[in-house]
Amino acid sequence: MKQSHAIVAFVLVVAIVAVLPLLVSSVLQFRAEIASAATLKAVGIGVYKDAACTAQVSQIDWGVLEPGNNKTVTVYIRNESNVPVTLTLETADWNPANATQVVSLTWDQENAQVNPASVVSANLTLHVAAETSGLSTFTFTIIITGTG
């Protein structure tokens, strides 16, 4: 009886050892990492890393993103004119151009009004689709405009 238990245990161990690499490789096969960066252009306003507006933002490094994930970066926008401005966001210069099919950018300050010398925080959220169609890296330009 003990010998049959030993044989069953041995067969189970061999089966697990044989199947485990296949399971691990299957899991890793579906993992994709996407490197990304965005240049930031500000029109009529200043965009900063901190609420005190001491360090301007000219580029956002989104880091490595996985399909199906979002990443949010907070920036601070100061109205540097002498009239109230309305904020808008757009993107341009996507490389590759088809990245827009699986990646998008949103924020929480669209059409917000900012008074002169006032500062508002803005959360920029990059959305990556669950299926990225082989996209491995991309870049784009973020344009934040203050119109007044």
Image (cartoon, helix red, strand yellow):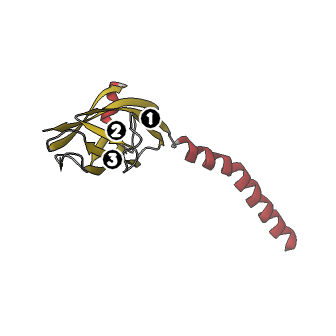
User: x, y (%) of residue 51?
Assistant: 36, 51
Q: Splitting the image into 4 quarters, where does residue 131 fall?
A: top left
Amino acid type, callout 3: Tyr
Dividing the image into 4 quarters, which one contains the N terminus? bottom right
From mark 3 to mark 1, how far is it between C-alphas? 21 Å
User: Dots 2 and 1: beta carbons under 8 Å?
Assistant: yes
Of the two numbered discs 2 and 3 in the rendering, the one whose residue sits closer to the viewer: 3
Q: Secondary structure at mark 2?
A: strand
**Residue at (33%, 47%) from the top-left corner?**
76
User: x, y (%) of residue 44?
Assistant: 22, 34
User: x, y (%) of residue 103?
Assistant: 34, 38
Mark with earlier residue (3, 1): 1
**Residue at (29%, 45%) from the top-left corner?**
77
Q: Residues within 10 Å of mark 3 (few under 14, many from 20)?
A: many
User: Dots 2 and 3: beta carbons under 8 Å?
Assistant: no
User: Which is more toward the observer, 136 or 46?
Assistant: 46
Which mark is drawn over residue 103?
Answer: 2
Q: Residues within 10 Å of mark 2 (few under 14, many from 20)?
A: some
From mark 2 to mark 3, how far is it between C-alphas? 23 Å
Which residue position holds label 1? Answer: 36
